[in-house]
Amino acid sequence: MKAARLYGPGDLRVEDVAAPGIPDAGWVKLRVDAAGICGSDLHNFRTGQWISRSPSTAGHELTGTVIALGEGVDTVAVGHRVVADSRFWCGDCAQCRAGKRHLCTSLGFVGEICDGGFAEQAVLPARLLHVIDAGLDERVAAMAEPLAVALHAVRRLPRTAGSVLVVGCGPIGGLAAMLLSRTFAGTVLVADRNRDRCARVARVTGATIVDLDRDAIAAATANAPLLAAVEATGSIAAFNQLLDLLDPGGAVAMVGIFHGRLDIDPNVLVEREIALLGCHAFADELPEAVRMLGELSEPLLALIDREIGLDEIPAAYERLLAGKSDGLKTIIRMRQPAGKDF
C-alpha cells in the first residue's frame, strides 16, 4: 500500500510499504477514507520538533472504515465508519486520572507515537475511535478532530459581551470563527494577511473582516469593547499587535503553533488584567464535535481548500507552507470518487 512517511525535517516521502497485518489486542485496522493536513503536520515537517520515530506515517486527522479487530475489541465492529482521536495518552499519570488526557505528562499524537492516516490503511487503538453516521461525507468526517480543537479554544474564552476577534483564518481560526458566529452574541471579527482565505471565512461564517488596527476594529463594532480573541497564527508579530488591541479585562485563547519566543512587558498583563489562555489540542470536545458534523456539513465543505490524492501530499505541503491557499483545509481522499478528478 502507499503511505506518506516522514523521515526527518523536510523529508517526506510517498512510498510503497507493507500493509498492516492482524491488529494486536485492543487495536483496530482501518481502511482510511480521508485525512486532513494540519498546521502541526507542516510544523513538524519544517522543524522536526515532534519526530520521535523515523520513518513514521504522518496524519492525525483521519476517518476510515473498520476492516479488522484485535482481540478484546467490542466498542466498534467491522464495517463501522469512525473518526480518530489524535491524542495518544498514557492513562496512568495524575492528569489522565483527573480526566485531562490532553495534558498527559507523556502525551503523544497519532502520526508520531504510532503511524497515522496518510496511508491507505492504518492500525489504531480502539480507545481512540468514535463511530460516525454511515452516510456522513468523508470529507466532513475528516474535519472532526480540528473542529474539536477549535471548540476547545472557543470554550476557553470567558463569556463576555462586546466583540471577539479571530486572528488567523487557517483551519483552527476559521473553524473557531464558524463556531463563534453560531454562539457568540456580539460581533465576530476575523483578520488574516491572506485576503482570499479571510474573505472565504467571512463569507461562510458571516464574520466581519478587519485589519489589526484599533480604529478599524472600533468602526466595525461601533466602539464595543474587544474583550475576547483567538490567536491562531503562531506569529509573534501578530500576537504583539493583538495585545495592543485588547481592552482591559480581555482574554486571548492561544491556539497557534509559534515559531520563536515572546518578548512582552508583563506589566501590560498585570495592569490591564489581560489573560493568556493556552489551548492544547482538546479535552472532552471530540464526541460533541462528531455530533455537530451533520448540521455543519455545508459550511465545512465550503471551507475546504483542495481535495488531493496521496501522491500529491509533498506538493501540498510546499504549497501550504508558502501560504498559497484560499481555503482552510486540504483533504486527502484515498479513493477517487466516480467521475471526478482531483
Image: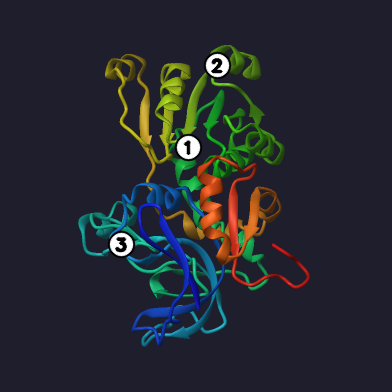
Query: Residue 279, relative to residue 207: is it above or below?
Result: below
Please tell me which of labels 3 and 2 falls first in the chain: 3
| Location of mark 3 (residue) | 89
Q: Residue at x 36, y 86 (%)?
A: 72
Query: Residue 286, relative to residue 253: is it above or below?
Result: below
Crowding at mark 3 (Cα within 10 Å: few <14, some 14-19, many 20+): many
Q: Is residue 87 left or right of residue 204?
A: left
Disc 2 marks a residue whose amino acid type is: Asp
- Does residue 288 appear in the picture of this structure? no
Q: Residue furthest left?
A: 93
Q: Residue at x 42, y 60 (%)?
A: 86
Crowding at mark 2 (Cα within 10 Å: few <14, some 14-19, many 20+): few
* Residue 39 percent location from the top left of the image: 47, 47
From mark 3 to mark 1, how far is it between C-alphas? 24 Å
From mark 3 to mark 2, how far is it between C-alphas? 41 Å
* Rendering colour mode: rainbow
Q: Which mark is residue 232?
A: 1
From mark 1 to mark 2, how far is it between C-alphas? 17 Å
